[in-house]
Amino acid sequence: MLVTVLGASGRTGIHVVRLLRRHGHTVRAGLRGRSRGAAVVELGAEPVVADLASDPSALVDAFTGADAVINTAGAGDPDPSMVNMVDRDGAIAAINAAERAGVPRFVQLSAQFADSPDQGDRLVRSILLAKQISDSALRRSSLVWTLVRPGTLTDQPPTGRVKIGGHLEPGRVTRADVAAVLTGTLTEPFTENRGFDVVSGDTPISAALTAFA
């Protein structure tokens, strides 16, 4: 499978690239600029420029021929203008570009409470609102989609175990485990055209994805 990963050099994206390559997939690593390419090249991925805050038309080339897109990109600056540029407008541009490029599958890294921002932490309300809009755009698209809404992300080692559900209590989860969930959705039909929360739990990731029906 050929997969384009957006935000590939980020703290979650790099885990996604590593897992995809470990499972034998061909990976295009979408980056804001070529200078960030060394880490993904070491993992065996092909770096491509795919900047959600820049020219959306360039995304079509990065997506053409791909079997799936996994969008892990997020604004590095919590300023609302940057959040809207990347998490809202940039993500919508990526969705539109994937449709134009004929990509059949799109997996988006969202955030817990993006489907109900008024219930989330006020400190990240602008992020949740931006993701709510782009998540809605993905659901309305012609793509086969999955929305993964993790709790608070941590950089702890992977546990291989999570809890998945339509709406869960606030929780934490490692980036590595979220990456395993994101990549796992590509081969799990139960996750197609579905959105779900994910936090740390006791169920092996593959079983949690299969059980989500």
Image (tube, rainbow, N blue to C red):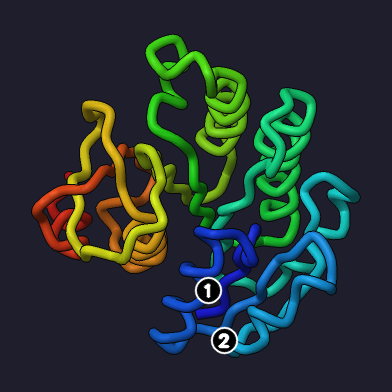
What's the amino acid at mark 2?
Leu
- Taking the spot 67% from the left edge, 86% from the top edge, the residue there is 41
Q: Mark 1 points at which residue?
A: 17
At x 77%, y 73%, the residue is 48
CB-based contact (under 8 Å), mark 1 and mark 2:
yes
Residue at the spot of label 2: 43
How many numbered discs? 2
Image quadrant assignment for residue 213: top left
Residue 151 in the image: x percent, y percent? 35, 38
SS type, badge 2? loop
Residue 153: x percent and y percent? Answer: 41, 46
Q: Is residue 71 left or right of residue 57?
A: left
Near mark 1 (Cα within 10 A), the count class, few <14, some 14-19 or many ≥20, is many
Instruction: Give the residue displayed 62% in from the left and 65% down from the top.
Output: 8
Q: x%, y% of residue 5?
A: 60, 65
Measured along the vertical axis of the image, is residue 182 above or below residue 166?
A: below
Left or right: 17 with respect to 165?
Answer: right
The mark found on residue 171 in the picture is none
Residue 194: percent from left, percent from top: 35, 41
Depth check, front residue: 62 or 19: 19
Q: Determine whether, in the image, residue 42 is placed left or right of residue 52.
A: left
Q: Residue at x 57, y 78 (%)?
A: 2
Residue placed most toward the observer, 91 or 160: 160
Tell which of 199 and 115 is nearer to you. 199
Q: Is residue 107 visible?
A: yes
As displayed, is residue 91 above or below residue 128? below
Mark 1 residue type? Val
Element assignment for label 1: helix
Name the N-terminal-most of marks 1 and 2. 1
- Residue 195 in sight: no
